[in-house]
Image (spheres, rainbow, N blue to C red):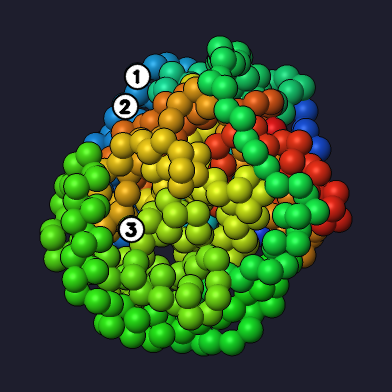
Amino acid sequence: MLLMKSPFSSACAGCPMNRRNFLGRSTLAAAGLVGAFAAPTLLSAGPARKPRIRIIYALHAEKQPRPDWPNQGFDFGPHMERITNELAGKCKGLEFFTALADGPEKAKRILAEDQAAANVDGYIVYQMNCWNQVVQTLAGSGKPVLYADFQFGGSGGFLVYNAAFLRNRAANVGYVASSHMKDLVEAAKCFEQACAGGNVSFADLTAGVRTKATPRPGNSRVHKDDVACLKPEDCAKRLKESKILAIRNQESGPGGEMAGIQIQRVSFSELNEAWKQADKEETQAVADAWQKGARKIEGVSRETLENCAAMYLAEKALLKRHGASGITVNCLGGFYGGHIHAYPCLGFHQLLNEGQVGGCECDVRSAATMLVGTILTQGRPGYISDPVIDTAKRQIIYAHCVASNKAFGAAGKANPFDILTHSEDRQGASVRSILPVRQMTTTLEIDSDKKQILFHQGIAVENDPDDRACRTKICAEPVGDIEKLFTMWDEWKWHRVTFYGDIKEPVYALADVLGYRIVSEA
């Protein structure tokens, strides 16, 4: 990989936000940042020379050593070399050198070295893996920072950390979330103007470049889709009669309620015992049905398929035993901890097709959101996802390894699906669902503590086949302001739940009955 060392010995006196300008106002505790951001600071004139910009790649290691987005074993080297060379080749007014950082300690050492040498005018922090906290330290330097998302690699951390900067009006932090390299290049050129002097903050400079490059809303034509929703009063009644099983660890017992839904904690051992007891003939029949129904199966053995079928039967058994309509499992913790021996993904896929709820990662809030939407729409499945935003296409991409292939409900038309390994570790089995396009979708997240429902809509336009990150990726053009869509992730975390259909009016009506407030994020 190309790493350009710094030969420089002096700082750019004209760079906009030094320590004296860095006035404390409020902390970014959610992102782990100690420090705060002043209102936009005036940029002063500097010497006539090229600004020196350090690119810091935030990631675990050059070759990914463990399960995470994009996937275990992923080689970042060629991607970092390409990014560095593109910037060096197309930003002739800047000089670049690079570093890798896996977390705040390494970031602090880099910053201390740069401050001692006084040879860095600004930073590009590239979020390559999701949760490495690097950008917070560099933002605290007061120097201009361009924060970039390596899509389907660092997107979760990027969205959450960047939303905190936006909430705190970090004048020295700009961002780029684009699949087009030219958008990164144009944003990086803002360093030249920042060091040349002016009265515009670095955040505003990059925002101008970003919004100019973002396409206008496209053809909003959608296929007709009449959703027969329950009356809000009837939906609220059904919620109070419902139950979700939450399997997080070895604990069991009452788990409170969410949006009126009873939460019951169930242990890994109860699920695992039900898996062991699954009927062999039934298991084989379920595996046969999946094998026959899938468009293709890749990297998944028949033995793995049967293990997943037994897990599905175990999930069904627990739902029946506890009188529940939904189940959510700490899948990775259970599998990696040896508490369960098959991923629950295919089982969740099947439950969703049948009008029940199978929710990922023991995310009770999202599982409750799935159940609320399924009851409200009289059977349409919710799709829990880790979203990615791409301004180059004006899209939000909903990505996950579990999805129904009956987006309009159990009696509705099925769409093709593939059975593949779980993306992050290339183990087990999961689903790539080729979801319908030219359909209106409604995305929600319900928080009963806040008594709020987060809400946005989008038009499904394509399925992204990228092998990085989760298998299913339905791309939607947001209805509304894509810039606003960057602002809520620090308060609401990463997951969202998407339903097919325009259910805006029924959701608003249900919120009134529940006494909740709608928060529009686009």
Q: Identify the residue under disc 3.
A: 346
For residue 255, say whether it is visible.
Answer: yes
Question: Mark 3: which amino acid?
Answer: Leu
Q: Secondary structure at mark 3?
A: helix
Q: Nearer the viewer, residue 394 or 297?
A: 297
Mark 3 vs mark 1, foreground winner is 3
- Measuring from the top left, give residue 364's x and y in whole percent: 59, 66
Q: Quadrant of residue 305?
A: bottom left
Disc number for residue 256: none
* Quadrant in the rendering for residue 216: top right
Residue type at the position of mark 1: Gly
Q: Is residue 427 left or right of residue 245?
A: left
Residue under pointer 1 = 89
Real-space Cα separation, disc 2 to disc 1, in angstroms = 6 Å
Q: Indicate left or right for 513 with 173 as reference.
A: right
Say which quarter of the image contains residue 64. Answer: bottom left
Say which element carries label 1.
helix
Label 2–label 1 contact, CB within 8 A: yes
